[in-house]
Amino acid sequence: VLQVLTDMKCQVLCVTHFTLPPSTNSKHSGAMLAAGDGNGTVWVWSMRPPYELLTSLNGHADEIQSLCAYVDEGNYAIF
C-alpha cells in the first residue's frame, strides 16, 4: 500500500490502522489502513487482499501530520 502511495508521488507523513468488525453494515470489514500526506489528503485502504483503496478524503488546508481512528459499532471516523 505504501509503495502505491509512493508511486503516486504522495509524501506520506503519518499512518494509522483500525479494524471494522465483520458484523458491520459496510461491505468492507477487517483491517484498514489510513495514511495522511503532505498535500492534505487522507487515503483509506483495505488491508485484506486485494488491498484496495476504499476512499481518499480531500479538502484539508494543510499537510496531515497525525491521524487517529475511532470505531463504534461498525462506523468509523478518522481524525
Image (cartoon, grey):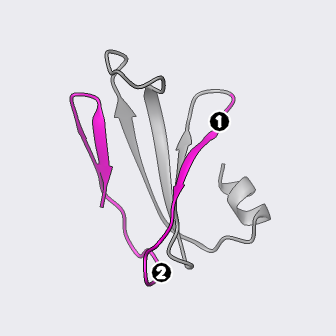
- Answer left or right for 35 relative to 18: right
Q: Residue 63: within the magenta?
A: yes
Q: Tell me which amino acid carries mark 2.
A: Glu
Q: Position of residue 72 (x, y in %)?
A: 20, 35
Within 10 Å of disc 1 (Cα), the crowding (few <14, some 14-19, many 20+) is: few
Tag 1 or tag 2, which sits nearer the N-term? 1
**18 and 75: which is toward the camera:** 75
- Residue occupying the far top of the picture: 23
Establish if 65 lies above or below 8.
below
- Residue occupying the far left of the picture: 72
| Secondary element at image label 2 | loop
Can you identify the residue that label 1 sits on?
Answer: 51
Establish if 23 lies above or below 4.
above
Magenta span of residues: 50-79
Quarter of the figure with residue 25: top left
Within 10 Å of disc 2 (Cα), the crowding (few <14, some 14-19, many 20+) is: some
Q: Position of residue 44 (x, y in %)?
A: 51, 49
Q: Position of residue 30 (x, y in %)?
A: 44, 26
**29 and 16: which is toward the camera:** 29
- Residue occupying the far front of the picture: 59
Q: Position of residue 79 (x, y in %)?
A: 30, 61
Q: Point out which mark residue 63 bears.
A: 2
Q: CA distance from mark 2 to mark 1?
A: 24 Å
Q: Tell me which amino acid carries mark 1.
A: Tyr
Establish if 38 lies above or below 44.
below
| Secondary element at image label 1 | loop
Q: Residue at x 43, y 83 (%)?
A: 61
Quarter of the figure with residue 76: top left
- Residue occupying the far bottom of the picture: 62
Q: Point out which mark residue 74 bears.
A: none
